[in-house]
Amino acid sequence: MRTIDLRSDTVTLPTREMMDAIAGARLGDDVSRDDPTVNALQEKAARMFGTEDSLLVTSGTQGNLVSVMAHCRQGDEIILEADAHLYYYEAGNIAAVAGVIPRLVKGDHGVFTGQQVCDAYRGDDIHFPPSRMVEIENTHNRSGGTCWTPAQVAEVARAAHDLGMKVHVDGARIFNAAIALDVDVRAYARHVDSIQFCLSKGLACPMGSMVVGDGEFIETCRRKRKMIGGGMRQAGIMAAPGIVALDSMVARLEEDHDNAAHLARELTRTKGLKIDLSTVQTNIVVVDVTATGKTSEEFIAEAGKKGLAISDLGPRTVRLVTHHGISREDVDRAVSIVEEIAMSCSGGQCSI
Ligand SMILES: Cc1ncc(COP(=O)(O)O)c(C=O)c1O
């Protein structure tokens, strides 16, 4: 029995076209800037976002880290959302490696306001760490893949810039936001100082992320990347599928969004499951399983036995992510499995 893997869009496998591109890639030493395929990808990403330059990095985590290191100095403070991936899931690297301290603001589905930035900002006082950077996550993972609109980004960026702070976007899934809202990624990039986006999630590359920004910032990121061991040699084998992804995998994200919306609508009919449909804007569905009487761990274990892999978001919340390689039939089978588990609770009777 094939397992339907809805743990994350990171489980996507490279397409045939990507594998062919890897095999045929022209290569060179990228630390010396000699890899033509890396250079082509970097030029392409910068063009797409309307920025001066871009840089290939190994992962979203590395892209966010070099951006923080480039914007900030040790002892600075960054303002970010309380459930931000950068705060929650990146192994404490902003403190351990970059030496910055987080100041958390609570967003509404991951989105906060310019006023919250002004309120969190700390003025010039010897007691305080200097507030140096604001971080926005778009789409917001733990909120269920929710989108920031360009207007919301512009408003926060204006507040941050007026206070002398930089703005970095963790856009691991920014193309999902752009497709969902039918906007160009340039509509985000023009307001902020840097964006990190992942090639290795919905775009289905085996690895890699990009950082986009102005020329001077990208040069600093390049140095920071080297410092943390991210200088790569024949990195064209990583860049080649990235070029394929930017050419051919962006528009199809809509299919993943349609599948997620279908999945969420079907699951809301199941007794014992709670889904806030307003958060299902892209390819992530967050399900509260409290009323089934099971913990998320128990729920996930049962799903696993029935051939469905899903992930844990907290003691009673699970996450399902649609992606390339998941068909509508897979989604329908996933719905049946989740329904079966939910209905098996408390002898067939759920508490809600
Ligand atoms: C919002 C967000 N930012 C950053 C990352 C980190 O990306 P990577 O796993 O490539 O380090 C992820 C990974 O899931 C993510 O969801």
Image (cartoon, rainbow, N blue to C red):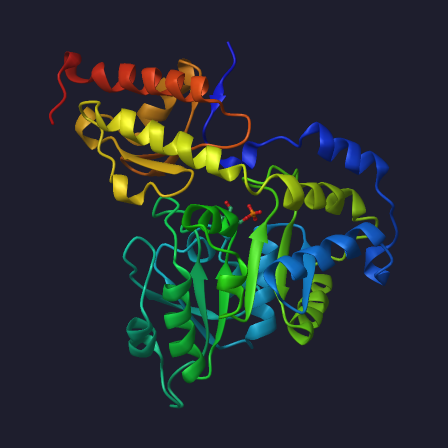
Q: Along the line of sight, which residue is nearer the eye, 132 or 75?
A: 132
Residue 15 sits in quarter: top right
Q: Residue sitting at 57 percent across and 53 percent down? A: 197
For residue 111, side relative to residue 132 (left or right): left
Quick one: which residue is furthest to the top in this view?
1
| x then y, percent, for residue 86 | 47, 57
Measured along the vertical axis of the image, is residue 72 above or below residue 339? below
For residue 72, side relative to residue 299 (left or right): right
| x then y, percent, for residue 42 | 72, 57
Q: Residue sitting at 35 percent across and 36 percent down? A: 285
Measured along the vertical axis of the image, is residue 193 above or below residue 142? below
Measured along the vertical axis of the image, is residue 301 above or below residue 44? above
Quick one: which residue is furthest to the bottom in this view?
125
Q: Residue sitting at 46 percent across and 84 percent down? A: 164
| x then y, percent, for residue 87 | 43, 57
For residue 100, side relative to residue 269 (left or right): right
Give the quarter of the figure containing the C terminus: top left
| x then y, percent, for residue 172 | 52, 51
Asked if one can make out residue 98 in the rendered structure from this viewpoint, the answer is no
Asked if one can make out residue 170 in the rendered structure from this viewpoint, the answer is yes
